[in-house]
Image: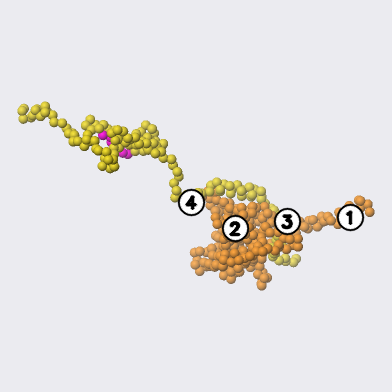
Chain colours: A orange, B yellow
Amino acid sequence: MSAAETTTTTTTTTTPTVEEQLKDLTVKHPLHNSWAFWYSMPQIKSGEAWEDLLTKVSEFKTIEEFWGIQSSIPAVDSLRSDYFFFKEGIKPQWEDEHNSKGGKWTVNISDNEFGQGTVAKFWGRLMFSIIGGSLEYNHETKQFEDEINGFYISYKKFGYKAQIWTKSCDKDAVMRVGEKLKSLLQFSEFGIEEEINAKGELKPTKFTDAKFANVKFSFISHDKANEEKNLVISLV
Amino acid sequence: MSQTLALYSYEEILNLKSNAVIPVGFDHEQFNLDFHERIELAKKNRRRSSHHFNSRPKVHRPKPKVATDNDGWSTVVVETEDQPADETAVEEKISEETATTEETTGKNKKAKGTVIKARPNNKNLGSSRAADAKDIQDIKKKAFNAFAALVSDEDE
């Protein structure tokens, strides 16, 4: 076999065809919902209104686009304001008609209290769970519950505050979200910074959830004026 | 067309990390630029912490200069920096009958180079030195004028 023939044969077997390349480019992994990434800038002057600092940065509807945003923005550790992810068409304001009848789960977390890297891990798992759909998917009914409107993380003096906003104050629906949120922290041994091994599996860790046993998760409705709807739940 | 379930595990999401695609219209370079610039500005304009709320800033106040003469008069000079130099805090009024120094009040009090003349009260002094006889003797305020007495209205 001549050298030229060898080269031709090798090229044919290793290089994908143009059709295959086009197919790869178009195959993306669609999300159950379209999302928007919002960012609020840190306040510089005392007179600056929060609404003016809030910016809708980009929309995305696939896993690939999610990673495109996530890989190009500063890590949550360097955040000094807020990152928001809300479903398309919903503003991260409680006055929004989609939010006004709902409430929010809140959890405070800091690296100082739980160890270096905990915030990034928790935030990573929170994004994966909600955007990937696992936090809203009901395996019994085999349907998405669509109870979550959005979620965000805020920088605070003590550390970070994460919130999940729900569309209603239905106790059963809200509790299902809260229990899953709690499990995210208790099993946040891996997150956005973690790598998977050659077999496509997450690296095993020696993480212990004992230190998160007493973390308080609280839910409160946005509608503070109506006491009947003012649901307050704490998970310990 | 089959409906795909858009449910992704952590492993599936992490596996797609290398396929990242920047969404159309997202200027990530500008976002990062604004992000860091805003944080720097916020740091510069950061409020002072409450730790400083109850403390006063240090201001250098020169100690007053006190000079005491042989008669026991003390002159206190308080130097201030924010007043014109030609104003004085004390006006000395020397009458023909008694030589007294009076402090004036009001606008002159805040003058630069404040001069206060004061004579200490002997009863408040702890000195064991005997009092000067000149200080305690009775001095007639008005001497008797014999010639004036001779000139009487009754004689006229």
The local crowd at label 3, few if under 14, some if 14 to 19, many if 20 or more residues have their Cα within 10 Å, is few
> Circle 2 sits on which residue?
A111
In the image, residue B74 sits, relative to residue A30, either above or below, namely above
The local crowd at label 1, few if under 14, some if 14 to 19, many if 20 or more residues have their Cα within 10 Å, is few
The local crowd at label 2, few if under 14, some if 14 to 19, many if 20 or more residues have their Cα within 10 Å, is some
Does the residue at mark 3 contact the one at mark 4 (Cβ under 8 Å)? Answer: no
Return the x and y of residue B90 as percentages of the image width and height.
32, 35
Residue at the right extreme, as displayed = A1
**Quadrant (top left, top right, bottom left, bottom right) of the C terminus of chain A:** bottom right
The local crowd at label 4, few if under 14, some if 14 to 19, many if 20 or more residues have their Cα within 10 Å, is few
Residues shaded magenta: B100-107
Q: CA distance from mark 3 to mark 2?
A: 28 Å
Circle 3: element type: helix
**Amino acid type of the residue that numbered disc 1 sits on in the rendered structure:** Thr
In the image, residue A164 sits, relative to residue B22, either above or below, namely below
> Circle 4 sits on which residue?
B51
> Circle 1 sits on which residue?
A9
Q: Chain of mark 4?
A: B
